[in-house]
Amino acid sequence: MIDLEALPHLPGCYLFKDEEGIVLYVGKAKDLKKRVSSYFQKRDHDPKTASLMQFARGLDFIVTNTEVEAFLLENTLIKKHWPRYNIMLKDSKRYACIHLTGEKFPRIRIARKNTGEGEFFGPFVSARERDYIFEVVRKTFQLRTCRKMPSRACLRYHIGACSGPCISSVSVEEYGEKVKKAISVLKGNIRELIESMETEMKEMAAKQMFEQAMELRDEIAALEYLQEKQNMERQKKYDEDILNYIVRDNNVYLMLFKVYKGTLEDKQDFVFAFGEDFLEEFLVQYYSENDPPEELIVPEPLDESLVEFLAHVKGKKVKVAVPKQGDKKELLDLVLKNVEIGFFGDRKKLEALQSKLSLPKIPNVIECFDISHLSGTATVGSMVQFRGGRPDKHNYRRFKIESVEGIDDFASIAEVVRRRYSRLLEDKHEMPDLIIIDGGKGQLSSAFQELRKLRVKVPIISIAKREEEIYVPGLKSPLPIKKDEKASLFVQEIRDEAHRFAINYNRLLRQKALIQK
């Protein structure tokens, strides 16, 4: 389900996904809300975009600090997911590189193949990112682009875009220094280069070489703008995980940014109940199933025994950083910004649902049930849980129907509801704030009767397909909630997730049955 209201007016990247959660398209935007909304406002899409919107069922986004960062992140996400609507080529080697030739006065060019003398940088999936970097480097260091050096100066020299090696306006040594600086930038070592150029500029000014100092000043300004990219692509030889969270309404809303060799590649988000040692419990559970990074960036110090545990799992030392300033602190703050926007945009959906259903409190924990079968065979039930407006996959449950023969959705729903809440009662666990049943009045009645037998008093509704009508026990007619209202869209989102989860389990059982045959 795509909820435009959750999108912020901030730069970042957006990811359209299909019903299976597969990324279809990655885009970047100066204003996420305006850009994504435009897909739904425009009617005359080109064929590719029209096809994308036909299959798009979900949306994710990552907020960045600047548009330049979004530029880079878009490229990284495309390389990671290879979305079908972003690209046609499948071999990244066929994407263009930036090439500095091996000539006496090297020229800078775009190359489709990384063969020949000189140095190659790339390849770049995003032509926009490649062209931007190409233009900054070319203009900043006044590198030649001509295939064959002319016998007289061309227009590019006269407008200050080329240093003019063709007319000996620059020596081989001077031009070589420009090329070295260009290579440093293309390798990502911008900060070091800026520092050395600032020192050189001060020396020039001290010697009253003001024209040369001004040229260096302009070059530094161009490079500092390009350096914005390095908040998302810092040159590192090791991996980092950056974690931050917010505790609110007795829940923990946590995000984990995964940085590989200096490049932000993905984010993961989690919602779970607050406990005194929640961070330690999360880290132990997460890194028991995932390889710890070489550096973990967190907002608070960790116990030494936990750090030792991470090192044991990793097989070598894991550095834990709690930054107070600098680029690591900026990344930590960026994760926190994504927590605030990504999670608490969902609160509006919860408030809308509370209002439309006249619930006594915000439905922070919602559980939804669905039944799936194939012509009466391999009947299964699914239960998904949403916490704080987000899927809490740790609390998903699957049910293989045991007491029902043939096709009987009413009896199947009754069985899974009975099994779920009798177990919660037995284990003395808290009940959800709202129960949703996929189906009409019949399925709702069957589930409601089971709750009454168990003496479980939790608000329950059902949502019927086609018109997306919402029913409550005791009323013959559906509630007066339009299917395009925020509350209904949220219920549809939860129902669709339960349906997806049930179908996947059904397929798994059928595959196992075929293997056994």
Image (cartoon, grey):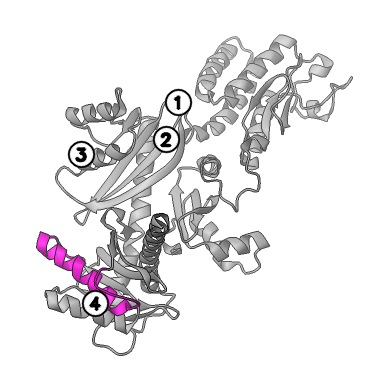
- Name the residue: 45% across, 63% down: 2
**Dot 1: within a 10 Å radius of its alpha carbon, few (fewer than 14), some, or many (20 or more) residues?**
few
**Residue 20 is one of the magenta-drawn residues:** no
Name the quadrant containing residue 248.
Answer: bottom left
Residue 428 visible, this orientation: no
**Between marks 3 and 4, how big is the CA–CA gap?**
38 Å
Instruction: Report the residue that reaches farthest toward the bottom.
Output: 476
Boundaries of the magenta span: 402-431
Nearer the observer, 30 or 126? 126
Q: Which residue is mark 1?
A: 236
| Image location (x, y in percent) of residue 104 | 76, 13
The numbered disc on residue 259 is 2
Say if 188 sits above or below 84 in the image: above
Secondary structure category for the residue under label 2: strand
Q: Which residue is mark 3?
A: 280
Q: Do tag 2 and tag 4 residues touch (Cβ < 8 Å)?
A: no
**Residue 417 is one of the magenta-drawn residues:** yes
* Most common SS among magenta residues: helix
Q: Do tag 1 and tag 2 residues touch (Cβ < 8 Å)?
A: yes
Secondary structure category for the residue under label 4: helix
| Image location (x, y in percent) of residue 274 | 19, 50
N-terminal of the pair, mark 3 or mark 2, is 2
